[in-house]
Image: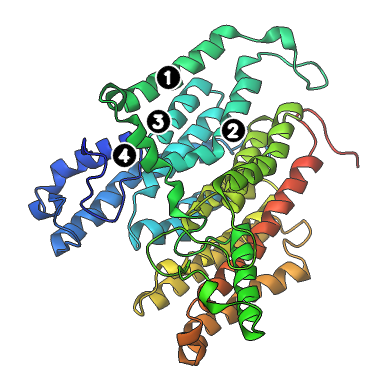
Amino acid sequence: MSSHPHLATSEWTLDYPPFFAWFEYALSHVAKYFDQEMLNVHNLNYSSSRTLLFQRFSVIFTDALFVYAVHECCKCVDGKKACKELTEKPKFILSVLLLWNFGLLIVDHIHFQYNGFLFGLMLLSIARLFQKRHMEGAFLFAVLLHFKHIYLYVAPAYGIYLLRSYCFTANKPDGSIRWNSFSFVRLISLGLTVFLVSALSLGPFLALNQLPQVFSRLFPFKRGLCHAYWAPNFWAVYNALDKVLSVIGLQLKLLDPKKIPKASMTSGLVQQFQHTVLPSVTPLVTLICTLIAILPSIFCLWFKPQGPRGFLRCLILCALSSFMFGWHVHEKAILLAILPMSLLSVGKAGDASIFLILSTTGHYSLFPLLFTAPELPIKILLMLLFTIYSISSLKTLFRKEKPLFNWMETFYLLGLGPLEVFCEFVFPFTSWKLKYPFIPLLLTSVYCAVGITYAWFKLYVSVFTDPPVGKTKKQ
């Protein structure tokens, strides 16, 4: 990183924490044997067959950590661990749902990113908490945060669970905290673990007085409320409503075209944006909304302990709540909820239903990432394969229970088909394409936002209706 605060060689900002920079530095020592030119930071938009070969192989190689993490997670749901009723079949289903996850496959191996080993760290951390190896889980999560800070979304779940289940060493018979069981030694151990990892990551920048520059890149609030493609969350619906109202206002001549902001939320590079009719949203507003959304799950994790399973539910709700109401959320962030939800899906029919709704709508919302004609049949085929397997395998697993979908959920999921046909095969040949080019993205975001919001709400209901550890529902 340059010592000059305004030096920039590209419009694409360096917005990952220091550990990821060290990771790419390590990769560069291998990359130079493939193509030296790819390492020239001034060589913008450089491409070569050897560069592509290196990128693909490096993603595959680092996915080894993800494969190991999946193996550890499967061990946590067999008969010897947390869920005694499970057999080999659910373990196999879980391994397929994780290893062949459609979203991770296209984001890493087609769109190209290194999310696989990062999710591997997260899943391995979760596995360690299930195995009651709390210090290892805390260490892995601290390391993960310094690779990619988007995992701050789920940090509240980790903090509360470790405090509740590790620092307090005993509960009363009713499941409430035994306050005199608090261990300062364990609290200090956790604090030192997080501090030492953070010191290793940020210490050099602190010594060089460059922490302000690091944080300005990690938290770029000037980028605007939404990404260039709207993530399917609450703000997508908010933006769509503003778009509709602005179009109606112009048609009825209630708005002055000269006073409408020229910046478009779907026009490429991220930027600040002012709403036309509805009040513009600030980072503080999104922070307040996010905190309000995650508080019930945190409250439930503290006062209604459900063991590692309760922690996992809270983690997913933190990820979904941050996705729903966060500032400048990327559409890929939905994977932070989908992948851990896979672990719950093989345990209960209700969780399987939530997973299928969330994964189907969340995965479809990633379609705009692959926008070229050759990629169209690939993404459709891959998603169909994953979705058909997910639904059929989980329906077989819970065949003795009530159907996984009601008529409304079935109708909604089937609606994704006509939506794809319209966006890809009808709209491009209409006169609307020139006047309203944002319509396909708007429809995709809003339609998927409905499904993700429904899954989020349904998961919240399950948190408050499931009994605490040690208690069962009355028959």
Side of 87 where 59 appears, left or right: left
Q: Quadrant of residue 17?
A: top left
Q: Which sits earlier in the primary sequence, circle 1 or circle 3?
A: 3
Q: Is residue 46 left or right of residue 126?
A: left
Residue at x 34% of width, y 47% of height: 63
Q: Position of residue 336 (x, y in %)?
A: 52, 48
Q: Amino acid at mark 2?
A: Pro
| Circle number at residue 156 | 2
Percent coordinates x, y for residue 202 in the rendering:
34, 27
Crowdedness near tag 1: few (<14), some (14–19) or many (≥20) residues, C-alpha within 10 Å: few
The residue type indicated by label 3 comes to Val
- Mark 2–mark 1 Cα distance, whole angstroms, equals 17 Å
Camera-side residue: 351 or 329? 329
Q: Amino acid at mark 4?
A: Phe
Secondary structure category for the residue under label 3: helix
Q: Are marks 4 and 3 in contact (CB under 8 Å)?
A: no
- Which residue was labeled with disc 1? 195
What amino acid type is highlighted by mark number 1? Phe
Element class at badge 1: helix
From the top left corner, tell me how far across and down residue 292 is, in percent.
69, 41
Q: Quick check: marks 2 and 1 in contact, CB under 8 Å? A: no
